[in-house]
Every structure is written in structure tokens, then in C-alpha cells.
Image (tube, rainbow, N blue to C red):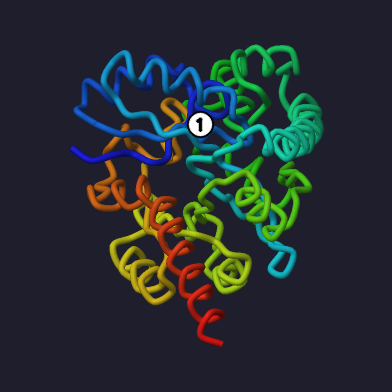
Amino acid sequence: MGGDLHCHTKLSDGSLGIEDLVLLAKKKGIETIAITDHDCLAGTVRGKIIGDRYGVNVIPGVELSSRDEKTGKSVDILCYLSDAPDRLQGLCHKNSLARKKAAHFMMLQVAKRYPVSAEFIIKCATGSTNIFIPHIMQALMESGYTNTIFGDLYNKLFNKETDGNILVTPKYPDIEEVVGAVHDAGGIAVLAHPYLYGNIDSIPRLIECGIDGIEVWHPSATEEQRAELKKLATKNKLLMTGGTDFCGLYNRYPVSVGDVDVPDDAVTKLLGYKAKIRRMQKKAQKAAEEAAKSN
């Protein structure tokens, strides 16, 4: 079977540890997965080691939070196969602090409405590098106020269209800065789930910023939307990737690792992308040198 290029672990907003995630992929016959925790690179090295142990190819990645200042919308950028991941640590740290600040405010607001302490929410986030909304919802669920992470209570508290919601959107850097940081670190920048946050309008600007690809296959996109994304990617010579956005208990959709049908050639093209770029650069350099000689 092919691969799942978008998976989260306990280090961010997933409910499974790295080894459990790799074992699940192994048991389902998934040959390749990418660990793409939110603003967190901590699991990439361990993920590769555990993957090698069980015969699963684990691609190092990270899902970086950003914002399109032109549209005012949140935009997630997937970074794959970074040559110098340490160069992304500063950005991850900055985003992490912004997320913690927003989470602190939301926890205080929840405590005003329900007898759920910040300490209990933090306990639900044990193992994570931050506090995510699903952790707050788990605390409310375990306290008996709901029986699901994503449902009526979630919409009441965290849907920005709902009156009286307590949602706080962290202040993230602009997409130009984030895409630039990915490339400075020698990584491949891919727009995550364009339809989940309504980021279609941001694609032209992302192309100007040098985005390398688009996540075409994702649970949030219908077959018709995937077809449109394929056209966009083909027209602009962009990589096409895909994955389940797997978070285990915290899944927004009922989906398990590998349940989104990502074509094998999409995985192959991602893995060979940087080699292709280097060949094109050498070819262009050679052509420039030959043109200089002829002049």
C-alpha cells in the first residue's frame, strides 16, 4: 500500500505515541507515513528510528502555523524532508508561545462556565508540547459535559461563527515568512488542507512565495474539490500530497491511518522532489555557463 503523509502524535494534538502510530501503520500495511506534529520537530528523529525497527518508512515533517495577512485566515504549511530542521526551531518556539497564550485565555473562560480546572486540562494534555483545543474538549468530555470531542459543545465554544464563543486565534507569522523559513531550512513547503480553513484564495499568493505543493487528498475535501486541486497543482507544476491528518481520539473525522487513498506516485514524487530540483538547477547553471561562453 501507499502512504499517509499527514499524521500527528501525542507531541501535538494526537492521542497516540510515536511507537503506537508506527505499529498501527505497520498492522494496516502502510509502507510510508509522515509525522507532521504542529510546530514541533521533537518526534522526527525518534520516529525514523522506530520506523526502521518496524519496517515503516517515516518521513520527517512538521505542520507550521501561519496566517495570510491578505485574507486574515489561518494557513497551515506542511514542511517535509528539511535538510536543517534546527533552523525551524525558532519559528516553532514562537508559534508554540502564541498557542500557549491563546490556550491559557480559553482555559480561563472554560473555568468560568464549567467546574473544570486548568490543572485537569493540562493533565489531559500530558505528553504534548502544548495545550490544544481537543485537550480542553477531552477535559469537558471526561467531566460529563459532552460525549464527543467535535460536536455541539465544541461548536458552542470554539466555532467563531457562534455567538459567545471563547475561541482565541493565536498570532502567527505571515505565510511569506513561513514558506521562506521552510526553504531556508532546505525543506519542501506544502499547503495543508486548503478547504478546511478556506485557503483557496491564498494559493496565488503562496505560489508567489514559492510554495512547492498542495495537499490534494484530505478528509476535508470532496472528490470534486480534489479534482479542482489536481487541476491547480498541474497547471502550476506543484507537488500533490495527501494524508488523513490522523490524530487518533482527536480526529475531526472518523478516519484511521492510511484511510485516505494517496496514490503511490505522489509519495514517490515527494521523496524524489529535491533530487529533481537539484538536477534542474544544475541543468540551468550549465545552460547559463554555455550561454556566457558563446557570448
- Closer-to-camera residue (237/9): 237
Is 90 left, or right, of 222 in this rendering? right
- Position of 87 with respect to 212 (left or right) is right
At a point 38% along the width and 22% down the height, the residue shown is 21
Direction from residue 39 to residue 149 in the image, left or right: left
Residue on which the image places disc 1: 149
Q: Which residue is drawn at 34% across and 63% down?
A: 226
Considering only vertical position in the picture, is 80 above or below 23? below
| Residue located at (72% from left, 55% from top) | 177
- 36 sits left or right of 107 in the view: left
Q: At 54% from the left edge and 61% from the top edge, which residue is drawn?
A: 211
| Callout count | 1
Classify 10 Å Cα crowding around label 1: few (below 14), some (14-19), many (20 and above).
many
Which quadrant holds residue 140?
A: top right
Position of residue 31 relative to residue 5, above or below, is: above
The x, y position of residue 263, in whole percent, is 23, 51
User: In the image, residue 74 lies at what x, y percent?
Assistant: 65, 54
Query: What is the three-letter code of the residue carrying label 1?
Result: Ile
The one of 55 and 245 positioned closer to us in this rendering: 55
Q: Quadrant of the C terminus?
A: bottom right
Q: Position of residue 115 (x, y in %)?
A: 73, 18
Residue nearest the observer in this picture, 84 or 238: 84
Tell me the quarter of the image containing the N terminus.
top left
- Picture coordinates of residue 96 (x, y %)? 73, 33
- Residue 235 vs 145, above or below: the answer is below
Q: Kindly state the secondary structure of the residue where label 1 is placed.
A: loop
Res 16 → quadrant: top left
